[in-house]
């Protein structure tokens, strides 16, 4: 029981109010980990047999906001130690900070500790699903999926493929990437709530032969995902043009190797041409909008409104360690700030949509997660709108939901995450809420 917000569709640029449902005093009824009903508290139990409601356990979150668990559509767990690294832009940041940190995960025990810590911290930030880059080491994927499976999380992850333009210790080959990828898919894809994502790092670090292998792997089984990076930084763009002189633009490199389509998601997409946007949309390829990382690395201001207007599916993402926080609330704030700088409109409705259902749709997981429609998996986060004195002060007497949501995303952070539930069960709790007896 609490105030409940979820989206049924993209509210679009016009903030179509039929796209969301809000219940000021709402109930979310969960059975066997799935949403059975969501509606006003007074009627959510209508039609539910008495013996079921009598046996139910109740979580009383009155005064809190319950939303579907946040979906981080692009992040790197091995980069926890890279967050907040000073003074570099993308390509030097990769060389000087990121590659050394990823090299350290050659140590399998460190990979396991890192993955467990990352998963726990995602839950503490209200993120219940993420599309995650591991390292080039196959065991780094085992470490992540093992940690996610222990918490029964819906997660995507893949072994980074890179066979050139990186330190020798981080290099695989087209053949080893194919063998490792096949074995990992066999071991993990479709196990419980886990899905494998074929993960060529980005065009500059894969040979043409390896990009072909990525396509082969992705199409080897139905339902596999694919993730990479696209058009993040001007030096990167120039380098791609130099490395692939036969391709008409950056997107064409991926297009050429069969790497576009539904369940493919590319981080960034900042400096795209109109033609690239059109081809992304036509192929059903999604972009992970990473505003915090784009600010931190000085990569540019992603024109998210223009991408959406072109029909490109968007998710929101932290891109840790390019971003110094795991918080999707802070990413929503950065999304607004980047949009202001780029002259793009971002309403609170669209920001909350992007962090939940929009991310699920961008990953092709909206039949499972992202909303409280009946039958969806009941992963949700409970947010305290009075978590800080400033928020309390700001929101006192404010009734308008749009204004409350906007202040919460701009001023909120992990301190607002009161609890995170996975398949209905409480998996993280900031401070134990009062136990209440069954209410009917
Ligand atoms: N491009 C290639 N690799 C990376 C990475 O690890 N982070 C970001 N932000 N961009 C990349
Ligand atoms: Fe990234």
Image: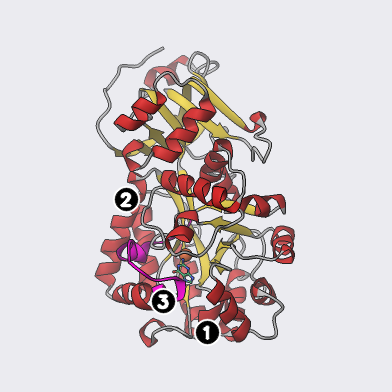
User: Pointer 2: residues within 10 angstroms few (<14), some, or many (20+)?
Assistant: some
Quarter of the image holding residue 19? top right
Q: Name the residue beneath numbered marker 1.
A: 174
Label 2, label 1: how far apart the Cα atoms are: 34 Å
User: Pointer 1: residues within 10 angstroms few (<14), some, or many (20+)?
Assistant: some
Residue 43 lies, with reference to residue 374, above or below; the image says: above
In this view, the residue in front, 203 or 371, is 203
Residue 6 lies, with reference to residue 438, above or below; the image says: below
| Front tag of 3 and 1 | 3
> In the image, is residue 11 part of the stretch drawn in magenta?
no
The tag earlier along the polypeptide, 2 or 3, is 3
Q: Residue at x 44, y 40 (%)?
A: 410
Q: Quadrant of the N terminus?
A: top left
What colour scheme governs how the chains and residues are painted in the rendered image of this protein? Answer: secondary structure
Q: Residue 308: percent from the left, percent from the top?
A: 67, 50
The tag earlier along the polypeptide, 2 or 1, is 2
Label 2, label 3: how far apart the Cα atoms are: 27 Å
Q: Residue 348: percent from the left, percent from the top?
A: 54, 37
Q: Is residue 284 visible?
A: yes
| Left or right, 152 with reference to 222 | left
The tag earlier along the polypeptide, 3 or 1, is 3
User: Pointer 3: residues within 10 angstroms few (<14), some, or many (20+)?
Assistant: few
Callout 1: SS: helix
Q: Is residue 37 visible?
A: no
Q: Name the residue beneath numbered marker 3.
A: 92
Q: Residue 207: percent from the left, percent from the top?
A: 56, 85
Label 3, label 1: how far apart the Cα atoms are: 25 Å
| Left or right, 365 with reference to 50 | right
Q: Residue 406: percent from the left, percent from the top?
A: 49, 35
């Amino acid at each position: 029981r609490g105030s409940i917000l979820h989206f049924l569709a993209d509210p679009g640029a016009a903030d179509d109010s039929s796209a969301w449902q809000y219940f000021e005093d709402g109930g979310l009824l969960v059975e066997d980990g799935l949403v059975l009903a969501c509606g006003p508290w007074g009627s959510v139990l209508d039609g539910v047999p008495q013996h079921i409601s009598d046996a139910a356990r109740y979580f009383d979150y009155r005064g809190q906001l319950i939303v579907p668990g946040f979906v981080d559509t692009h992040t790197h767990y091995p980069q926890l130690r890279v967050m907040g690294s000073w003074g570099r832009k993308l390509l030097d940041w990769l060389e000087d900070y990121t590659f050394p940190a990823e090299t350290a995960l050659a140590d399998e025990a460190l990979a396991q500790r890192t993955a467990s810590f990352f998963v726990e911290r995602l839950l503490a930030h209200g993120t219940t699903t993420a599309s995650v880059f591991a390292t080039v080491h196959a065991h780094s994927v085992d470490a992540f999926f093992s940690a996610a499976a222990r918490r029964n999380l819906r997660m995507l992850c893949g072994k980074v493929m890179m066979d050139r333009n990186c330190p020798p210790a981080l290099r695989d080959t087209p053949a080893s990437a194919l063998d490792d990828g096949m074995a990992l898919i066999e071991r993990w894809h479709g196990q419980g709530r886990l899905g494998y994502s074929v993960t060529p790092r980005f065009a500059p670090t894969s040979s043409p032969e390896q990009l072909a292998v990525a396509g082969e792997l992705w199409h080897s089984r139905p339902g596999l995902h694919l993730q990479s990076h696209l058009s993040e930084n001007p030096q990167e763009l120039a380098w791609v043009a130099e490395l692939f002189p036969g391709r008409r633009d950056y997107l064409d490199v991926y297009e050429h190797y069969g790497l576009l389509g539904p369940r493919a998601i590319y981080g960034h997409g900042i400096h795209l041409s109109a033609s690239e946007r059109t081809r992304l949309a036509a192929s059903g390829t999604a972009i992970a909008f990473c505003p915090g990382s784009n600010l931190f690395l000085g990569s540019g201001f992603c024109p998210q409104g223009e991408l959406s207007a072109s029909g490109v599916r968007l998710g929101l993402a932290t891109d840790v360690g390019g971003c110094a926080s795991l918080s999707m609330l802070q990413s929503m704030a950065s999304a607004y700030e980047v949009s202001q700088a780029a002259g793009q409109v971002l309403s609170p409705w669209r920001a909350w949509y992007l962090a939940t259902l929009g991310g699920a749709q961008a990953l092709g997981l909206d039949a499972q997660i992202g909303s409280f429609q009946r039958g969806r998996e009941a992963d949700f986060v409970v947010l305290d709108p009075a978590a800080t004195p400033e928020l309390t002060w700001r929101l006192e007497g404010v009734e308008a939901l749009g204004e409350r949501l906007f202040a919460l995303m701009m001023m909120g952070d992990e301190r607002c995450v009161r609890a995170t539930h996975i398949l209905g069960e409480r998996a993280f709790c900031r401070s134990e809420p009062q136990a209440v007896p069954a209410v009917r």
